[in-house]
């Protein structure tokens, strides 16, 4: 059975929840597919994974000025909190068919990792330290117009 991609908007500006195209095959096993030019608003320039994270630890806790990211927990589960300075949402990423698009200027926090979690992140830009906003107060100042972005 083939399931086509569905995309759901969220209350956090620009964040979208994807149920990716997947095939359920009880004989040969399942397959999930994501086509960059068809399904994502960017072609990834960087891919990385986080894993082996103790359940009490948190990853992320930053926003990007320009980089968008697409996050999929390909094994195990973790929670993703997103915040645009006005609205917040939390997702439990617990199957490889679910992904979340996090646009620039959205604060993201990954936490409550299962011992076997593997989080795959597709990024729209190569790594650049200056693209990160790591202080939540600074992030709020920028999105609320208190400070100019660099």
Image (tube, helix red, strand yellow):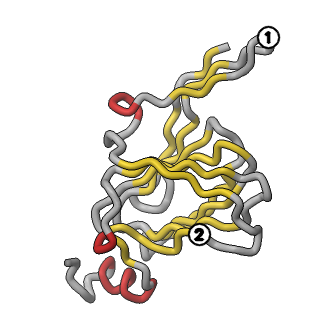
The relative height of residue 36 versus residue 77 in the rendered view (above or below) is above
Dot 2 falls on a residue whose secondary structure is strand
Residue located at (78% from left, 58% from top): 114
Q: Position of residue 41 (x, y in %)?
A: 33, 41
Q: Which residue is mark 1?
A: 27
The relative height of residue 148 versus residue 78 in the rendered view (above or below) is below
Which mark, residue 67?
none
The relative height of residue 30 versus residue 9 in the rendered view (above or below) is above
Residue located at (36% from left, 67% from top): 64
Whether residues under marks 2 and 1 lie with C-beta atoms below 8 angstroms apart, the answer is no
The relative height of residue 127 versus residue 135 in the rendered view (above or below) is above
| Quadrant location of the N terminus in the rendered image | top right
Residue located at (42% from left, 66% from top): 106
Q: Position of residue 52 (x, y in %)?
A: 71, 60
**Horizontal arrangement in the rendering, residue 140 relative to residue 56 (left or right):** left
- Number of numbered discs visible in the structure rendering: 2
Q: Which residue is mark 2?
A: 59
Say which quarter of the image contains residue 85: bottom left
The numbered mark, 2 or 1, whose residue comes first in the sequence reads: 1
| Between 58 and 3, the one nearer to me in the picture | 58
Q: Residues within 10 Å of mark 1 (few under 14, many from 20)?
A: few
């Amino acid at each position: 059975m083939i399931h086509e991609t569905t995309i759901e908007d969220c209350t956090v500006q620009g964040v979208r929840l994807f149920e990716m195209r997947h095939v359920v095959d009880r004989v040969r096993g399942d397959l999930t597919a994501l086509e960059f030019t068809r399904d994502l608003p960017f072609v990834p320039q960087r891919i990385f994974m986080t894993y082996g994270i103790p359940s009490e630890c948190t990853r992320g806790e930053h926003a990007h000025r320009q980089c968008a990211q697409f996050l999929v927990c390909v094994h195990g589960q973790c929670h993703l909190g997103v915040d645009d300075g006005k609205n917040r949402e939390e997702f439990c990423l617990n199957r490889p068919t679910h992904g979340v698009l996090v646009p620039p200027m959205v604060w993201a926090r990954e936490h409550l990792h299962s011992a076997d979690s593997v989080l795959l992140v597709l990024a729209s830009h190569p790594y650049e330290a200056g693209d990160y906003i790591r202080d939540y107060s600074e992030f709020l100042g920028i999105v609320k117009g208190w400070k100019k972005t660099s």
